[in-house]
Amino acid sequence: MTAFSSRRAWMVKEWIIFALCVGVGGHLAFAVILHAPDMWPLSTLWKAGLLSAASLYVAVQLIRSLWWVVRACPPYPSQDETR
């Protein structure tokens, strides 16, 4: 795999994650507004959608970062290494 194709694969992966977060965030905002229309006017749908999508994207990226940190840590030392 060349450097160009690995970078392209990384960008495609990030775009998919972003698109999923925007879609789920928009659906969450729409569900909240539909289930409580007296508390959330329809005119605030775009603000709620963007806010929930951005919050979800940040949460997903934090979880991914923590996963990479935890995954990079070596496992517990074996009995042979402690002697």
Image (spheres, rainbow, N blue to C red):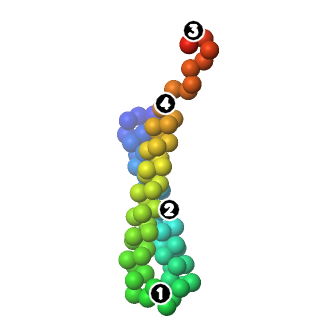
Residue 73's mark? 4
Residue under label 1 = 39
Label 2 to label 3: alpha-carbon separation: 49 Å
Residue depicted at 43% across the width and 74% down the height: 49
Residue under label 3 = 83
Q: Amino acid at mark 3?
A: Arg
First reached walking from the N terminus: tag 1 or tag 2: 2
Q: Secondary structure at mark 4?
A: loop
Label 4 near label 1: C-beta < 8 Å? no
Label 4 near label 2: C-beta < 8 Å? no
Task: From the image, state whether disc 2 or disc 4 is nearer to you.
Answer: 4
Label 1 to label 3: alpha-carbon separation: 64 Å
Task: From the image, state whether disc 1 or disc 2 is nearer to you.
Answer: 1
Residue 20's mark? 2
Task: From the image, state whether disc 1 or disc 3 is nearer to you.
Answer: 3
Label 1 to label 2: alpha-carbon separation: 27 Å
Residue closest to the eye, 65 or 80: 80
Name the image quarter holding the C terminus.
top right
Label 1 to label 4: alpha-carbon separation: 46 Å
